[in-house]
Structures are given as structure tokens and as C-alpha cells.
Amino acid sequence: MAASLHPFLTTGFSRCFRPFLFSLLGLRRVGLCLLLLALLLPELAAAQSTVSGTVTDGTAPIGWANVVLFDPAGKLAAATVSTEDGGFTLTAASGTYRLRVSFLGCTDWEQDVVLTTSLAVGPIVLQPRKLTRLQEVVVVGRKKLVDYQADRVVFNVENSVAATGGDAVGALGAAPGVLVRNGSISILGKGSARVMVNGRLLELSGDELVAYLKSIPASSIRNVEVISSPPARYEASGDGGLLNINLKQGLANAWKNTTTLAYEQNAYGAATLQNNLVYSKDKLRLTLSASVKQGHSQGKQTLDTYYPSGPWELRYEAKQRVGNAAGRLALDYDLSKRTTIGLQYAGSSTAAPSSQDHTQINVLTAAHTLESVLLVVGARQVRTSSHAANAHVVTVLDTLQRKISLDADYFTYRTDVDNRFTSTSLSPAQEYLHTSLAVRNISGQQIQNFSAKVDVEHPLQWATLSYGAKVSLLQSRSALQYYNTLPAAPVLDPNQSNSFEYREQTQALYLSGTRRLSTRWSLQLGLRLEKTHTRGYSATLAQSTTTNYLKAFPSAYLTYQPTANQRLQATYGRRVNRPGFALLNPFRSYINSTSYSEGNPFLQPSFVDNLELTHTLRETLRTTAFLTRTTDGFGPVFTASSATNTLVISRQNYFQEVTLGLGTTYSATPTAWWQTQNTVYLLGSRSRFSGELAATARNTPQLYAATSHTLTLSPTTKLEIDYTYSSAVARGLYTIGYQAGLNLACQQRLFHNRVQATLLLNDVFNTAYLKDYTSTVNGIKQVYSENNSSRFVRLSLSYDFGNRQLKAASREFGNDEERKRTN
């Protein structure tokens, strides 16, 4: 019997990959021109010269000495190390430089040189440095919990006591200015944020994104970068900016393994086992991590709808099964001193047995007396899986440190849901009246994404350039089968079933340049062009919708540093927020017998302009003022009908908005045992509705405050206290109630710091959940709240072991000790 290929390889793969290849070919000419420009621009900008010589100690040559060339501004122009016979050669543009030669145990040698064509300096003799024998050297260092850089805020997860034993969702929620609620991840005052892992964008949103992030253990995360105004090299999607999760890497010629066991208790309990291994020897670096979580969590929701005939009170409670496993493998290998290749794979799987949920809808009269009860009892099975693969090459082209990076990525995400529920009508006395609905929904969705990109870093004498290109192809397929199970045998209802396919192609080019205008001023300008083509097709409705647009996304950073302790920076950036593919599905999906949700195939992306001014004093006090303007904003609209008492959740482009923010952050170490981080923001917005939305925009100021304190009670004991507060706020169509959360965490290190025990009390007063999410459309008010186990206790135990003294097969460097100090 002849072997046959998998159908996906003969049909689905070719349908997905052919447009991807065509997109690559479409940008081929532009990419070739871009690459030729990278190679030729230095020659066009300035003539090249060389400086050469030998390094000795007066009697013998010195190999592996550092040889560095600096321009008049003190900026690195070229660098190398001497060969075994002491020789060296550097290439740079013609001009005046300072040549510096250094080697461990010797006094540095410096001399000003003028390069025209080529220059040979005489033998450079390094003099031995007088040494003083020390009895003992003790080096004590502590990385900040939060580090404020020029264009981003870095939250060091590995230094957070509260994040220990958790996952990426908890790590993002602990980052300053990041809000995680109701399946949405956003940056304070800016809007929804896109998430990257190791600089690679995740093509997920909403519940799918949260599910994927929960598969990444916090023990494998080094830090989280909050980038509210990303430079041109990053994707323009995400109106609130980008969140980049950087995973851990190992030290050179060492290996380390961390095993973590955690138990979390809310109304129910869940246990987590995580293991993270990092290994590095010679030219090879390896990271291997795995995690498993099993247990249950509690979910609660309330929705009150105030019809003219009387309010309807919905109360939902579920015992949600948690069962997932995830793994990651990363491998990098140095082909040479200048070229590195690497492969990465990350996968996760969730196989959850039935989760039980219970919904009760109390139907009241206008006099608030109970008229009837709708009881909805359901059982739900959810299975998800994801696979992500990456191949990359990074090479340094020459001694000018021109660098080119090539990436190819594939990502797939699949979810299957089997949802059964029965709706029963009861009398006010809880007596059975009739069964109005019995349904089984079997749904599935598969997302695939192919992408390839090239990035070039190109230092010149007068500026530093970066430019590149990216092509991305995304495809989503979803299907829903709706069965009426009220009869003896389930009956498929084709009018309630659905099949939807969505395709998106994005091609991007970018150019960014950074130049130091003077000792106090520096400027960075960038431009990103993105061409997007989308097509959505509903087989059920025989409806197809396509969009095409080419947009420019400029960015600018102007920095002024009047003194060594002060920095003033103005930034501008334009972003786009593309609707998720699920929001474009026009099919009507019933939540229960009285409410349904539907997408909008004509939904358009929204665009955001962000202007920000930041002043930093001594790297401890940071004050920021920003203005954000949103055009063609879209979101969910809750519309209730008084005639039929039904609730419809639709998606519309319905608002324009301007948001203002002013805030300050104070970070300090008042004593050797106390680190503190404090943030206060005052926000305000003005919204205007477009279209025929029968609602009135409401806007009120918002106060946000957060304080975090890490107390080192002893060399082995830490206490962390975190508190956040967000006042109630009206913004456009919605009003949101206040949120406040107090977290307490204690960490104890044991057995020479190899074991650490951490206890976390999260949301001690159970006030950090989403509450009083209110809108009024057509004169009917809806109030929604959701609490998915916001308050819980987590106990975790971590065990570290490894070897930091793997023997390297290569020759030792004369400056090994200095190199180690940089880790």
C-alpha cells in the first residue's frame, strides 16, 4: 500500500504557505535594495582607513589584548583583540580618534591618532601595573526590581518575591502600570497592549492570549519590558504599546537547574510543578523548561439588566478545572566569533475534564418582586494546544559592528470546546415550570501564523541606523455546531451553526536613526510602513469581506541631558489596534436563552497617536505627562431590548477619544534593607460617539496609585508588601468601579541559598477584581462584575543546583576576570 501525505501537507499547508512565499517574493526587490544599501552606505558616507600595530611587554608579544578606537565624542568606533603574535588591525572612517590598548595586569596605553588612508603605529609596550595583595574581597550587588530606561520600563521578575511560583499572567500583572483584567492586558492610560516573548510578537488576544501566557512559568522569566512608545523596529499593532517577556539565559560555561513546587488555594486548590534548566559550554547554549498545573479555580460573574418592566439579575458561579502542561527548548550555537544560529520551540496543552457551572437569572417586576427564575446548568470541556517554532541567524558583518538578524517563525494555536447547558424556568417558589432550552455546542478554532523578518543594525560615524523588513501571514479557521438536545436524540440546527475563515497578510518596512547632536542632545527618528490585506469569509452566511490599507507609523525621541543626574525626553509614536479575528465573525453565538454575542465583519482598525514628556532625576524620580488620541475606536457594545428582554453584545467602531495623564514614580533604597517603589497617576479623558449609538459619553478623572516595598529582614529573609488602588472612573460608554489590592509575600532561603520557600497572600481583602462595569444603551442600564479567584494563597518551594565551573575547551583570555564581572 502506497504511503500518503497528511491532508494538511497537501492542501492546508500549501494554501497557507503559498501566499506567504508570494509575499516574500513581492518584497524581494525592496529587501535586496535595503541589504545593498546596508553594505554600501559606509563607503558612500566616508572613506575607510586602517590602523595597525603590535602589542608587547617589552620582551614578548601580548596576545588577546583589548584594542579599542574611540571617536572625539568618546563613542566606540571599532574594537578588536590582538592575535597571538601581538598584531592587530582596525578599520574605521577617516578622522581623528583615540586609540586605547589594555590587558589585565598592565597599565592602559592611549594615544590620539589621525586616520587618512592607513596608519602603522610602532610597537606598543604595556607596562606592568603594581599589584597590592588583598586579604579578602567581598562584592555585594543587588539588581533593582524596576529599572527605568529611556524608552521602556524593565520589571525584573526574577527579583520579585510575589511572582515566585506563578505564571506569566501574574508576572505581567505585577509590572508597574500594567493592568490585567477580564481577559484584557493593557498599559495604564494607553489601552490594550500586544505581548511579545523574546522580542517575537504573539498573534493572540483575549482569552486565547491569557491561556497561552498561563503556560509560561514565572521561574523561566528574567524580566518584562513595558514599552509604551515602541521604536520603528517593533510592530505597530497594539494601541497601548508592547509588553516584551524576556526568558532566562545561563551564564557562560555553567549550568543551573531550578525546580519549583507550588500549591495555590482559593475556594479550590491547584498544584504546580515547574523545572527550568539553563546550560552553557563553549559555543553552545541550551535552555529547557517544563511545567504542569492541576486543580480547580472558582469563577463568579454577575450581570444586572434594568428593563422597564423590571430588573433581571444574573448570577453565575463555576468550578473551573485547571489542567495544563507546557515546555520550551531553546538552542543557540556560535558558528564563529561573529555568527550565531539558534532554534526555539515552545508548546503547551490543556486537557480539562468537565467544569461545572451554574447560572441563575432572577426576573423581577418593576416593584422589585420576584416574578420567575431561569436556571441554567452547564458542563464544559475545553482542550487547547499551541506550538511555536523559531529559527534565527545573527551575524556581525565587520569591525564597524554592523549586524544583521534573520528570523523565521511558525505559530499554531488550537482550541476545542464542548459546552452543554440546560435552561429551566421556575416559579418564585422554585417550583419547576418547564425546560425552555437544552443545547450542546461543539466548537473549534485553529490559528496559524508564518512570518519572516530581517533586521540590520548599522553604526556610522555620524549616526546609528537600524532598518529591516517583515512579512507575516495569519490564518484563522473556526466552526460551531449547535445541537438541540431537548428531543430524545440531539438534532443539528444549521441556522445556529457556523463556519468562519479569516486571513491576514502584513508586509512591513522600517528605518530608524539615532544621532547624538551634542554632549547634551540626542535624537532618534523612525518610520515604519505596513501594508495589510485581510479577508473574512462566513461559509454559513455566504458572506465575504476584504480590506486593504497602507499606513505609515512615525516615531520620534528627543533627549536632553543638562546634567549627569537629569534627563528630559519627548517622544511621539503612532500605533494601530487591529480587531481580533473572532470579533470579525458575523455569526450570532448564543450565551444563554436570553443573550447572544455577534461579531462585525466591517469592523475597522483604530489608530492611536501618543505624545509623551518624561523628566528623570537621579534615576529615582520620574515624572511623565502624556496625551493619547484614538480615532475609529472599537469595542463591545451591550444593547438590551425592552420589547424582547434580550441582551445583545456586538462590536462597533463607535468612539473618538483623547486621554491626558500626569504621574510620577519614586524609586529608592532608603537603607540597605529597604527598597521602595511608589507611583501616582492622575488620568482624564474626553470621548465622542460616532454613528447611531443611542448612548451618552461620560468621562470623569481617575486616580491610580501603587506602592511596593521589599524589606530584607536578614541575609536569607525577605518581605514584600504591594498595594494598588484605582478609583472608580467613567470613560466613554462605560463606568468601572474602584479596584484595590493588597499583596503580602515572604521569602526564606535555606541550605546555603539553594532552597527558597515563598508564601504569597494575593488580594488580601478581595477587592482587586473587576466590579460595577456599567453601560447604558437605549435607556437600559447593565452592570457587570467578574471575580476569577482574585484572592488566593500560594506556597512555593524552589530548589537550585548546578555547576558554575564547567571547563571550557578554548584558550583562556587575559581579561577573563573583567569579562566575568559583566554578568
Image (tube, grey):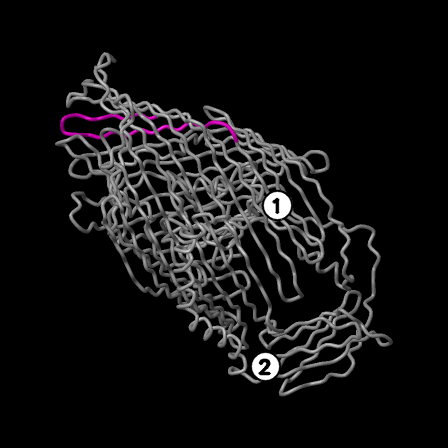
Q: Quadrant of residue 256?
A: top right
Image-based side of 630 in relation to 69, left or right: left
* x and y, in percent, of residue 8 in the image: 43, 49
- Is 807 situated left or right of 71 in this image? right
Q: Which residue is mark 1?
A: 288
Q: Is residue 559 above or below residue 733?
A: below
Secondary structure state at the residue bearing disc 2: strand
267 lies above or below 706: above
Q: Which mark is first along the chain, 2 or 1?
A: 2
Q: Marks 1 and 2: which is nearer the front?
A: 1
Residue extent of the magenta highlight = 294-316
The secondary structure making up most of the magenta span is strand
Kind of residue at disc 2: Ala
Residue 307 part of the magenta segment: yes
Name the residue that disc number 2 marks: 93
**Residue 652, image x and y in percent?**
24, 47
Tell me the SS state at disc 1. strand
Q: Residues within 10 Å of mark 1 (few under 14, many from 20)?
A: some
Residue 326 visible: yes
